[in-house]
Image (spheres, rainbow, N blue to C red):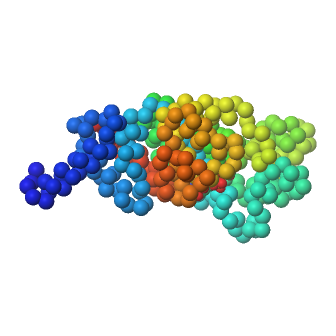
Amino acid sequence: MQPGRDTKAELNRRSQVCEALAGTGVRVAKVDLIVVVGFLKRRNNPAMMIPAELVPRLAIAKSVTVLTGAGVSAESGIPTFRDAQTGLWAKYSPEELATPRAFRRNPRLVWEWYEWRRKLVAGAKPNPAHFALVEMEGLFLRFHLITQNMDGLHQRAGSRHVIELHGNIMRTKCSDENTVVSSWKDMGDIPPKCPTCGGLLRPDVVWFEEPMPEEEMQEAMTASTHCDFFFSIGTSTVVYPAAALPSEALRSGATVVEINPQPTPFTPQAHFALAGAAGVVLPELVRAISALRRF
Ligand code: NAD
């Protein structure tokens, strides 16, 4: 170690590292100072607001559960429900289109809106947030990924087990029989008709005012109430019952982290609120955990 300013800086770094690791169980002697100091520095970068004390605590977690919302796919070009609709759809709000009532009133309008969204999804690619979540799956003993998204981008990125709470926009079902329909003859009807019973076809998603799929909801609840760390990412936490999961995790003793560039009703309760885009914050978090884990 060089005397003078470098020595001072080095001592200062070491004390920052010790402070960050206090009470985490990570042995300071084994930590690569350069790596840890790297993320301590990045803490001051507004784009990477990862609190220094978060990474060492997360690095020793055994069980992690993640809840994602529309914000995770925003960087793939799929608009969230809070974004203003554009073009043809500017005069409608998603809440007016994604309901059984809207479908009964105007099935053609609702089908066409979903056709437009399906095309967006088909042309979209997973973004760095989706890929970082694939990596996270390999970093913890138990890892659960719950999503409110219907776009299938987690699966396309490589996540193996995804609990889909709101269905999948690429699937179609019969609105009368509630069964998945994978093919039908194009007779020019919009929406097309069920080849078995002639009922109207609709996307296999959960609309506002509809019940949640029981099995998925049960699995999501168990994963949320049995984890060390819970992440709420890219969700406005206003669409219930999914929005209750972060509070359930909190009540069960998990450390709860929110990642969202905007505050949400849940932000004041989160242990850590990282105000940044998921595609920026998540890869950085994964890099920092992986680096710490190597020692
Ligand atoms: P939401 O539209 O209510 O909220 C999106 C949230 O994402 C907002 O809080 C916003 O600040 C945040 N956000 C925006 N960009 C972000 C980014 N880059 N990184 C992190 N966060 C970002 O979405 P919701 O909470 O998921 O709930 C609304 C409903 O919308 C759900 O039922 C969901 O099924 C449906 N939805 C799904 C998709 C999809 O499948 N991609 C798209 C739109 C809506």
- Left or right: residue 100 compared with residue 137: right
From the top left corner, tell me how far across and down residue 233 is, in percent: 55, 49
From the top left corner, tell me how far across and down residue 14 is, in percent: 22, 47
What residue do we see at 44% from left, 31% from top?
62
Instruction: Please identify the quarter of the rendering in which residue 139 is found.
Output: top left
What residue do we see at 55% from left, 51% from top?
267
- Left or right: residue 93 compared with residue 101: left
The C terminus sits in image quarter: top left
- Left or right: residue 180 compared with residue 262: right
Tell me if I can see residue 127 in this picture.
no
What residue do we see at 54% from left, 55% from top?
260
From the top left corner, tell me how far across and down residue 100 is, in percent: 84, 48
- Left or right: residue 282 compared with residue 149: left
Q: How many marks?
A: 0
In the rendered view, would you say 62 is above or below 128?
above
Name the one closer to the observer, 65 or 155. Answer: 65
